[in-house]
Amino acid sequence: MDKVTIRKKYLDLRINYDKNRRVKYSDIISESFYDLYKEYDVFLLYMASNGEVDLSLLFSLLWDYGKRVYLPVVDGDDLEFYLYEKRSQLKVDKFGIKIPITSNRFNIELDNNSRIVVGIPGIAFGLDYNRIGYGKGYYDRYLRNKSLGEFVGIAYDFQVLDALPADENDVKLDQIVTEIKII
């Protein structure tokens, strides 16, 4: 299958995934992610939309232990990450995604001694560590030019395929966390 076919099929599956399983598995994935990366300092994550794994429990765990959490904000063709704290106000962007209202942008130069992990959403993930997102390339462009640490795909197990088509612009993941396994 090509990227367009995979994107359509797995986005539809994700959006229509059983709500009870989505809630249960999101918590399992959040706990696994936390256990794997609790020694890290900075977490570049995302706010769930369109059936993505909900990281609400992970946010709470991270805040309880004084970790810094940042969420992505699209600005033109670029992706930047902004501080997300327990009491942060959120607004809805043009994609219908909640984003923090703050001017505190993540700056790799200020965090050069921090252990950083990027939790990346997607529509499909491969055992070859490729991923398919919405096709706009925001994450790939952002990650390609950064030395950030670990790039971790966050997915439900049904989103993981043996292999995915990829091109020279696609950034590979270091790991994938699902409710069943860590790849």
Image (cartoon, rainbow, N blue to C red):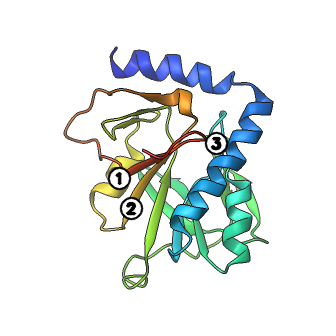
| Tag 3 near tag 1, CB within 8 Å | no
From the image, tell me which residue sits under label 2.
Answer: 150
From the image, tell me which residue sits under label 1.
Answer: 174
Label count reads: 3
User: In terms of image quadrants, where is residue 69?
Assistant: bottom right
Q: Nearer the viewer, residue 45 or 180?
A: 180
| Tag 2 near tag 3, CB within 8 Å | no
On-image quarter of the C terminus: top left
Q: Where is residue 93 in the image (x, y as percent from the top left)?
A: 65, 48
Indicate left or right for 145 with 60 as reference: left
State the CA–CA distance, disc 3 to disc 1. Answer: 18 Å
Q: Where is residue 8 in the image (x, y as percent from the top left)?
A: 50, 18
Q: Could you tell me which secondary element the residue under label 1 belongs to?
A: loop
From the image, tell me which residue sits under label 3.
Answer: 53
Q: Could you tell me which secondary element the residue under label 3 belongs to?
A: loop
Q: Which residue is drawn at 60% across and 62% down?
A: 34
Q: Which residue is drawn at 43% across and 19% down?
A: 6
Residue lying furthest left in this view?
168
Counting residues from the N terminus, which is met first, the one under dot 2 or under dot 1?
2
Q: Which amino acid does label 1 sit on?
A: Asp
Q: Could you tell me which secondary element the residue under label 2 belongs to?
A: strand
- Nearer the viewer's eye, disc 3 or disc 1? 1
